[in-house]
């Protein structure tokens, strides 16, 4: 009896899931062929590291054990 119910629910869920479509990640125009797509473009992005100041070091008081 449990097997029949499981199969029934599985078949119902499968048919309802098949009817739903997932949203597309890309627009069809993004996936369409454009002239020059067949050429491999090797580009190296040169990005400068961010200019940040280091934060001041402030030690905290030890309390308890690191591991229990």
Image (cartoon, rainbow, N blue to C red):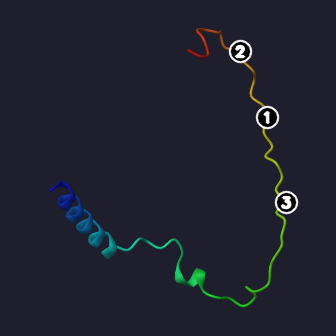
Query: What is the spatial separation of the Cα atoms under label 2 and label 1, in whole angstroms?
Result: 18 Å
Left or right: 66, with 38 as reference point: left
Determine contact: label 2, label 1, CB under 8 Å.
no
Q: Give the residue drawn at x 80%, y 79%.
A: 40
Q: Which residue is labeled 2 in the image?
A: 59
Percent across and percent down for residue 41 are: 81, 77
Q: Which residue is labeled 1 in the image?
A: 53
Residue neighbourhood size for the residue with mark 2, other residues' Cα within 10 Å, grouped as few (<14), some (14–19), many (≥20): few
* Badge number at residue 46: 3
Observer-nearest residue: 43 or 21? 21
Disc 1, SS = loop
Quadrant location of the C terminus?
Answer: top right
* Badge number at residue 27: none
Q: Give the residue drawn at x 75%, y 23%.
A: 56
Percent across and percent down for residue 45 are: 82, 63
Q: Comparing marks 2 and 1, which lies closer to the viewer? A: 2
Q: Earlier in the sequence, mark 1 or mark 3?
A: 3
């Amino acid at each position: 009896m449990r097997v029949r119910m499981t199969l029934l629910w599985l078949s119902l869920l499968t048919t309802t899931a098949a009817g739903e479509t997932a949203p597309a990640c890309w627009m069809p125009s993004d996936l369409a062929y454009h002239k020059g797509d067949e050429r491999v473009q090797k580009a190296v992005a040169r990005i400068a590291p961010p200019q940040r100041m280091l934060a001041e070091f402030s030690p905290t008081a030890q309390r308890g054990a690191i591991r229990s």
